[in-house]
Amino acid sequence: MQNLLPSAHALCAVVAATLLAACSLHTPQAAAPATAPAATAAAAHAIPTLAADANLAPAELLARGLQHRTLGEYELAAADFYAITNGHASAPEVRQARYYLAESFALRGLWSDAAVAMRSFRNDGVADDLSSRALFWLARCAEQAGSWAEAADFYEQYRALGTPLEPYARMRQAAQQQAAGQREAAAASYAAVAASGVARGERAGSHEKAIALYRELGQQGAALKLYADLLAFAEKSDYRLRILAEASALARQMDQAEQARTWERELIAQFPASAEALGAVATLQGDAGATLAPGDAARVYEAHEQTEQVVALLDAAIAQAAPADALDLRRRRALAPSAQGDLSWALGELAAISAADPSGEAGRQAQLDWVQTRGMGGETEAAIEGYRQYAQSYPDDARAPEALQRAALLLDRLGDTEGALQQRLDLGRRYPAAQQGQSALDTAAMQLSQAGRAAEAQATWEALAGASKGAVAARAWFWASRAAAAAGGDAASLLDKAAQAAPEAYYGVRAAEQRDALPPASEPLTATTSAEQWREAEAWVAQWSGKPMPAVDTDGYPAEFTASGPIARAVALADVGLYEDAINEWAEARLGWHDSPAMLYLTARYASEHDMPAAALRAAEDLAALAPDGSAPAPLAVRRMIFPTPYAETVIAQANEFDVDPRALYALLRQESHFDPDATSWVGARGLAQVMPETASGIAARLQVEDFHADDLYRPLVSIRFGAYYLSQQQRTMNGSLQGALAAYNGGPGNAIRWADGQDVADPEQFVETIDYPETEGYVKLVYGYYGAYRSIYHP
């Protein structure tokens, strides 16, 4: 990929000539955000000549320019937009071309030049959607230039338009007010956004910013109210823990003792292992007006292994409790580390509790604790027998499978391989539906397979397959077929069952491949969904949901859908380049309609039609998950949203150049980013293919890409190209194995070679089962399953 990008100076000349505005050439004062890669200022090429485009109509130039824009080729997009404005001055496409030409500067991080162009665009006085967008961009340009007052004024003007983005404009206005030292105004603006209906992540952030400002201003009452409002919807555990701690501390400072106690008790009850809960216990214990049950305080000290406090508190709790309630407190007291120093006393106490309540919760748990305590004391064989006896005595107890699993683990510890195997087989036979039973059958079956005991392995795999469904059943049927083949039996019918159990899971796909029975693909990768296919999807949803579906192709989208705040904001945010904010609003819409098949269908389709595959994919997955067991398979339109093909021509071209199956590349992109071009992982991987900047620099050098910047990975064309190249290199390293290449892509080439014991993956299934990074094992299976799904829908 040679550098074909025109220089910033050349494009500025374009804007000057086209818009009759002076073009500022100084370096922007602020770096571009992740969604707007930095300009390649060192490029020295001129704008591509227009001779080759002389026969292209303005509509064709506009379409091509927008395609370049979608791929992140902002410079080439600008050339097409310029060609319209320069060569077709009276064409109806000129206004759009002028807007997108101005926007192209902002998308490259050339904010000063974008400001000049956007001002010129708005000077024609036309009041339409493009003019509104230009005003929003002008505000962003002022932000980047550090002109806080000017940016705030632009956002104020934009807010007056009453668009769906009013709260986002106010949120950004608040940041400018704060930067300009207008803390009172900023706090009020953030508080207003916090009270709006924007995506909950933005609401939470606005709450916190308003709280911080109000506290700086000494308006603690306003801050405390916002804390209460925030806790009304903050659900994520780590986040709620922090907010509870901050809110309770502020309430204490304000002498709002009862409110503080309420929040402190929640900390203790919900987060006993946290340092904040430990502090809350100390605070409540020192609060003369507070009551804290000693048993509740003891749970916190138990979590922090502070034995002296645990014993004293449990003794106090036992003394206060009714006899029935005291049993579990006594059990916890017997398990305290100090009690374990006197195993004889601890065992005696646990036995007494069990005898006092043999059928109750405390009594049965005491029995298991008694068994475990004996094992900790070195009586391993006695503990094994105790776990067996528990399961025998209480076969319907939910803890019985766990007891037998512990017995198997203790047998492993003793080195009794056969005994552990038989224990797992017994567990699986008795509790095939339990997670412990299925795990035991899987482990036992694999052990039997590896020991060459094919007939026993086949029977065990089949038992697991019969007790499970989906991907677990497909895996079991697949390995049963391997065992059958080793025993000279019928492997083909078992492979067919594996393929039917989970056709889009790893072992279902591998079974279909071995039977040469992958479903025939009906669509090219470049296909679009037809009206008839949409109608089939609507009929499918109506059939299993029992509710009529809106006929979108006939009547359009229902007003209640298009007028929905999250939907309107999602579309408008994407229009002004705030793609991650748009994704969050799509997620808010899905959350609000999580139990409505009709609305989820509309969300998925609308997102798909607005070129937001990441949002469409997730909504379509949510929709498919609502379909009850036994309903007809998802129709093609729904499957195409779950396994979409954005950037099709580019993906095909890059995959073909580097000799990888484009459907495998799509499967990888789907797993890596869900087709969100702005995706960034917690370790710093970027873009559609989630390539690390350091890796990307090496790829850029090998592909002779000039002036590469890490933020270029957010450009779809760059990310697709680098991902295709890197996947092809790993597949070549692993001698053609896609499983090996995927393992290398996720877990590193060195690890992939280690798992294969070389570069040849002779047995893909043994290779996959050898991967000792759970994340990478899951990654390989997921991506390969997606690859099967793409092959069942699309032909190359």
Image (spheres, rainbow, N blue to C red):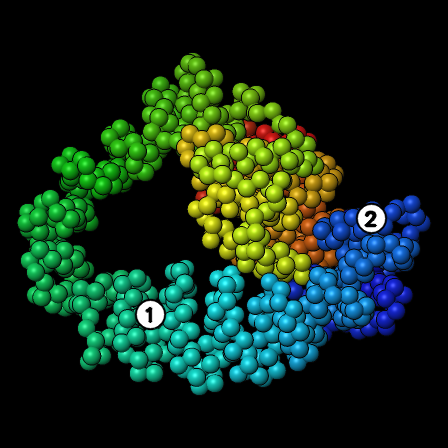
Horizontal and vertical percent for residue 534?
A: 60, 36
Please determine whether, in this image, residue 202 is positioned above or below residue 488.
below
Q: Amino acid at mark 2?
A: Ala
Q: CA distance from mark 2 to mark 1?
A: 62 Å
Determine the image quadrant of residue 684. Answer: bottom right
User: Which residue was labeled with disc 2?
Assistant: 59
* Left or right for 232, reference 262: right
Q: Determine if residue 649 is in view.
A: yes
Horizontal and vertical percent for residue 102?
A: 78, 63
Q: Nearer the viewer, residue 598 or 338?
A: 598
Name the residue located 66 percent from the left edge and 77 percent from the top edge. Answer: 153
Name the residue located 53 percent from the left edge and 20 percent from the top edge. Answer: 515
Horizontal and vertical percent for residue 297?
A: 21, 67
Q: Residues within 10 Å of mark 1 (few under 14, many from 20)?
A: some
Q: Nearer the viewer, residue 632 or 82?
A: 632
Q: Residues within 10 Å of mark 2 (few under 14, many from 20)?
A: some
Q: Residue furthest bottom?
A: 218
Name the residue located 45 percent from the left edge and 82 percent from the top edge. Answer: 215
Q: Determine if residue 751 is in view.
A: no
Quick one: quadrant of the C terminus? top right
Q: Nearer the viewer, residue 484 or 109?
A: 109
Name the residue located 91 percent from the left edge and 52 percent from the top edge. Answer: 50
Q: Amino acid at mark 1?
A: Glu
- Among the two numbered marks 2 and 1 on one chain, the one whose residue lies closer to the N terminus: 2
**Numbered disc in front, either 2 or 1:** 2
* Left or right for 691, reference 785: right
* Left or right for 336, reference 542: left
Label 1 secondary element: helix
User: Which residue was labeled with disc 1?
Assistant: 276
Q: Nearer the viewer, residue 343 or 192?
A: 192
Query: What numbered label is drawn on residue 129?
Result: none
Determine the image quadrant of residue 488. Answer: top left
